[in-house]
Amino acid sequence: MKKISWQVKTFCVKTVFLVSFIENSLSAQTECKEIEKEIEKLEKLQKKIEERIKKNEEILASIKKEKEELEVFKKRLDEEILKLQSERFKRLAKDFESMDPEFAGEKLSMMEDAKIAAYILYNMNPRKAGEALNYVSPKMVSKISKILTQLKNGKK
């Protein structure tokens, strides 16, 4: 009977081990399936993130392109403004040249912005500008001289 008892014990141990192994195996399979599901979710999230990154990069590229176009437009606009201002000062200079030097000097003296007076004089015939300056107030002549010096040196 001892021999049977040993065989029964061995059988029981093997059965317990086998049942435990099967349970662990089933548990591991369940865990593997759960892990695979999580991996699939993460892969989907990764694809969504990559798509968003791609869209954001496209938007960024579009913004950069628009910024460059705006900079070019701004530069052209600034050049056009300078051109129009230059034309305006040339017309004003012709008007001042046609005036009596004393009257032109009075008008230049009364201007609030010395820069405008300086730009007008800059665009006038030098002889006529000199005649008009004889009638400009000394304070305004000082301001105009500083601005004209900057203009002649290329600083606007």
Image: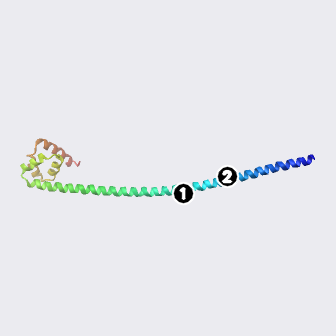
Circle number at residue 136: none
The amino acid at mark 1 is Lys
Seen from the viewer's position, the closer of residues 146 and 59 is 59
Position of residue 138 measured from the top left corner of the image (x, y, whole percent)? 11, 42
User: How many labels sit on residues?
Assistant: 2
| Distance (Cα) linking label 1 and label 2 | 24 Å
Position of residue 91 measured from the top left corner of the image (x, y, whole percent)? 15, 56
The amino acid at mark 2 is Glu
Residue 141, located in which quarter of the rendered image? top left
Q: Secondary structure at mark 1?
A: helix
Quick check: 6 left or right of 133?
right
Label 2 CA crowd tier, 10 Å (few <14, some 14–19, many 20+): few
Name the colour scheme: rainbow
Viewer-nearest of discs 1 and 2: 2
For the point 58% across and 55% down, the residue is 41
Q: Is residue 47 above or below residue 6?
A: below
Circle number at residue 31: 2
Q: Secondary structure at mark 2?
A: helix
Q: Is residue 144 above or below residue 48?
A: above
For the point 45% across and 56% down, the residue is 57
For the point 50% across and 58% down, the residue is 51
Q: Residue furthest top?
A: 139
Quick check: 150 left or right of 1?
left
Q: Which residue is mark 1?
A: 47
Seen from the viewer's position, the closer of residues 150 and 120 is 120
For the point 73% across and 52% down, the residue is 25
Residue 76, located in which quarter of the rendered image? bottom left
Position of residue 42 measured from the top left corner of the image (x, y, whole percent)? 58, 54
